[in-house]
Image (spheres, rainbow, N blue to C red):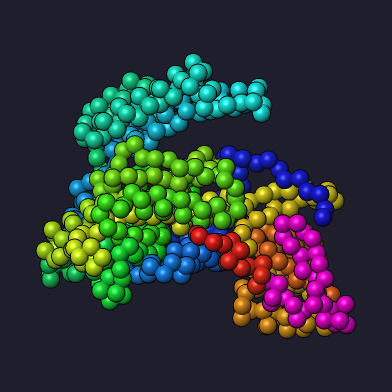
Amino acid sequence: MSKTLTKNITGEDLFKNVISHAKEYGFIFPSSEIYDGLSAVYDYGQLGIELKKNIREYWWKAMVQMNQNIVGIDAAIFMHPTTWKASGHIDAFNDPLIDNKDSKKRYRADVLIEDYVNKVLSKADKEIAKARERFGEAFDESQFKSTNARVIEYLAKADEINNRFKEAMDNNNLAEVKKIIEDLEIVCPLSGSKNWTEVRQFNLMFCTEMGSTAEGASTIYLRPETAQGIFVNFLNVQKSGRMKIPFGIAQTGKAFRNEIVARQFIFRMREFEQMEMQFFVRPGEELKWYEHWKEARMKWHLSLGFGASKYRYHDHLKLAHYANAACDIEFDFPFGFKELEGIHSRTDFDLRSHEQYSGKKLQYFDPEINQSYVPYVVETSVGLDRLFLAILSSAYQEQELEDGSTRVVLNIPPILAPYKVAILPLTKKDGLPEKAEMIRNDLKFDFNCQYDEKDAIGKRYRRQDAIGTPFCITVDHQSLEDDTVTIRYRETMIQERVSISKLTAILQSELSIKKLLGEGV
Ligand code: GAP
């Protein structure tokens, strides 16, 4: 194996490189770019769509195929408008906004406060890191946190701000939210001034009209989450599928939010895709299932192989109007730890509310306890685009190779890679392209293949590395004599000579979902 040196690119630099790589190789383009784009809306290109489809499928297999008691649906984006009254989105799906009078820039008040708290916490983290370096093996983090005066002060300050903000929001006290911003002396990042407007609530749902005005058009909403399509179909699925509690309904699909602070590429978009699962359980058992799904979802993320240090749980201080427990699985994006997935114990809020607004019973008769009840729900909800960004930014590496050359490589888990295999004839003559074409025609039924005969072989390997193709098959003159080829592994760049007849079996074993998911995910 040749020695490689992976450059240590992090933060802003890494993020910039990932964004330009995504565009250069056809993963992601700004939407309607010829018209200068549309803010916080993106298109997936020819490679992006493959990666996105593979992530979706990996999730679907883990949630639906591997669980006897979980089934999927695909509900429409448009739903009866009363859905959103019942779900609470019309009244409560708001962000607290504040404008800076000098820069005329609009901000989410909670984000300004959260950023401030993160700065305080990162000061504590720095102290902890310094101490870890000083004490080495003997370092006891929890003891240090509870005894070091500066760390205690930072953590207490963060707690105090969080609690004050939570109380203000719980009481819908927007004047107090503004006061917190003033007391913390938070300035506008653009103008540097503290000249703020009042804080006010802004509803995030997009709405449109269904039907012509003459007929009496009605206002309908683009769904801000896919979950409600599952709730309104709860009884349809339970009855037609003869489902017994506990059981789950999964769905992937588009959701729309008129995000105010839309930034950080595909992290926060106005049109995005969610992968959600609602797990219906007996009342009183929801916290047990909440813990179960918290653990199962973390295991699923870890199966991608980016390492445990990339993930952490964040328990919610401020619970949404429907939840009695909630946490995020956060991921270490190039711009720091941020929410990747939410796990929420939503109680019976949604089903009960839909019962009330529709006048239809949404109950389950539980033969084991001989009782009818409105089930409680534990939800897992992950953003497909966010997951895409997490994978792309962790997989992106720039390496210096032993021979002094460099390569950009996407170490995407092979099962998610857009192309699984590239078939490369060493030269464009002597019957090598024909042999390579034959191999492609055989493999293409099982694997997404690329065929490439342009340029020197080294250059072609680099092209495949840059798009994350895990295996390159090279057809050379020996292939014509003994029906063997070389297979090159993206991460190690090791090449092995193998029989053409064994290729399918080798690739199938390398791309086995069983290997990744294993037991219990
Ligand atoms: N049904 C619950 C729900 O929608 P959420 O925490 O608002 O909960 C779930 O969203 C997930 O959807 C988030 O963890 C995130 O991954 C993704 N998500 C939310 N808003 C998003 C946005 N504007 N752009 C991209 N992904 C988003």
Identify the residue at image location x=65%, y=60%. 468
Between 521 and 172, the one lying in front of the other is 521
> Is residue 454 left or right of 25 when viewed as pictured?
right
Identify the residue at image location x=76%, y=45%. 5
Answer whether residue 374 is magenta in the image. Answer: no
Query: Which segment is the magenta one?
Result: 478-507
Between 107 and 80, the one lying in front of the other is 80
Q: Position of residue 472 (x, y in %)?
A: 73, 68
Q: Position of residue 409 (x, y in %)?
A: 68, 55
Location of residue 450 (image quadrant) = bottom right
In the rendered view of the protein, which quadrant contains the N terminus? bottom right
Q: Is 158 located above or below residue 335 in the figure?
A: above
Location of residue 216 (image quadrant) = bottom left
Q: Position of residue 447 (x, y in %)?
A: 62, 74
Q: Is 174 located above or below residue 56 in the figure?
A: above
The residue at the far front in this view is: 369
Q: Is residue 54 visible?
A: yes
Answer whether residue 490 is magenta in the image. Answer: yes
